[in-house]
Structure formats: C-alpha cells, structure tokens
Amino acid sequence: MDRLPEFCRLDRRKRAIIDAARALFVEQGYERTTLKDIVDRAGGSLATVYKVFGNKDGLFEAVVFEKAASGEAIIQQSAAAGGPPSQVIHRLGEGLRQHFLDPEVVALVRMVIARSIEDANFARLFLERTATRTRKALANLFRHWQEEGIAMDGSPDLLADMFMDMFVSDLHVDAIGHGAGLDTSPDRLRGRIEFFLRGSGLGDGAAAKVCPPE
C-alpha cells in the first residue's frame, strides 16, 4: 500500500498546527494558550498533536526553534547573492535586522527568557540551535573570504561574535524593555555596519586586498 498520501497529510497537519500555535502563543501568551485552542484553529485532533509533538512543551520548542533558526538561512542567502564583502555585509545586516526585530521573534524570545529561568536544558538547547548556529554560519562566511585571500583584521570567530552582538543586543532590549528608547532606523544600522567594516578591514577596498598566490 502506498503510504505517501498519509505522510503528506500528516506533514500538512504538522504545518497547520505549528502555524496556529505560533500565532496563538504570540496573541495570548504561552500559558494562556491551550492545546484545544490550537487544534480548534488548526483543525485535526489532539491525538495528532500528541503523536507529532508529544505535548505542549514539545510544540512550543518546534515553534521557537523553527522561527529562530532562520538566521542561518539569511546568512547563506546573503552570501549566495554575491558581491564584495561590504555589499554582502550590508545585505546581511538588513536581513538580520528584519529577522531579529520581527514582532513574532521578539514575542517568542520573551517566552524563551521566561522558560529558560526554570529550565536550564531548554536554554542550552535554544542557544545551540539558534544563536550558536547563526554565529557559526557567519564565522564560516568570514573564514571562506579569508581562504579566498581577502585580508581582515580579526579572526573569523571574533568578527562573527562582534557582528552578531549588534543584533542580539537590540533583540534583548526590545524583548525585555519593549523597545523603549531603541533606535531601529536604517541610518543607525548603516552607521554601525560601516563602523564594523572599517574596524574589520572588510570595507569597500577589501576585495582589492587579495593576497597574491604563492
């Protein structure tokens, strides 16, 4: 018997449940949202939720890790679009700014912070699957440029940490302080990135700093 149709149906149900859960967690908060609320919006049954996610905590983890992990994809897409390092960095910065300050991401991070206080294992898993993976992808991009002969001031890991800190700090301010006093204007972002490019040696002249082959 061909099981592909059943697999496809289960995949669609899973997608609908995750989308409904994310929307309800943002609208109502994690504690106030029940599995029945999610099933009522997504369709399907509680049995499917338990089968696929285990429980409400498992569903919350699926929602959070899916949304937060997209930072790695933004880095890969920005690099794939090509151009000199300065152009890629500016493109990447705008993509990360939009991602990290997305109201859904900010709302989910508030819930992550609250849960992490009580669950250290969840906090470690969140870091491993989100911030750590994003930093690693960025460090790999810098490392690739370095291997291509583009000179830079600082190790790939150091530059990745410094660049990511700009966005993570804004995310925390927005999540904890609800954006009080936070300037998220494009001009501020461009200024910070230009400062980073000058300090890292990856400014407009970086493409010309290719070391001659041995």
Image (spheres, grey):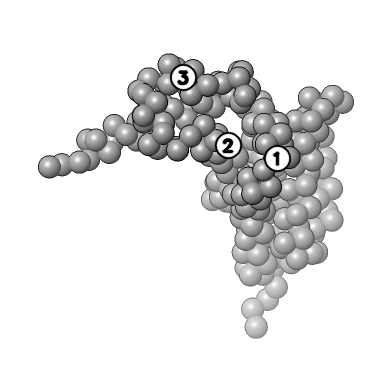
Residue type (three-letter) at the residue carrying disc 3: Lys
For the residue labelled by badge 3, is the local secondary structure a helix, a strand or a loop? Answer: helix
Residue 205 is situated, as x and y percent measured from the top left of the image, at 76, 57
Residue 75 is situated, as x and y percent measured from the top left of the image, at 60, 48
Residue type (three-letter) at the residue carrying disc 1: Glu
Using the image as rendered, state which of residue 101 and residue 141 is in the foreground: 101
Q: Residue at x 73, y 40 (%)?
A: 117
Q: Residue at x 84, y 24 (%)?
A: 180
Q: Residue at x 70, y 73 (%)?
A: 211
Numbered disc in front, either 2 or 1 = 1
Residue bearing mark 2? 64
Classify the position of the N terminus by image quarter: top left
Mark 2, other Cα within 10 Å: few <14 / some 14–19 / many ≥20: many
Using the image as rendered, state which of residue 58 and residue 67 is in the foreground: 58
Give the quarter of the image for residue 122.
top right
Residue bearing mark 1? 118
Return the disc, 2 or 3, that comes first in the chain's sequence: 3
- On the question of residue 205 being in view, the answer is no
Mark 1, other Cα within 10 Å: few <14 / some 14–19 / many ≥20: few
Using the image as rendered, state which of residue 161 and residue 27 is in the foreground: 27
Give the quarter of the image for residue 155.
bottom right
Residue bearing mark 3? 36
Q: Is residue 44 above or below residue 126?
A: above
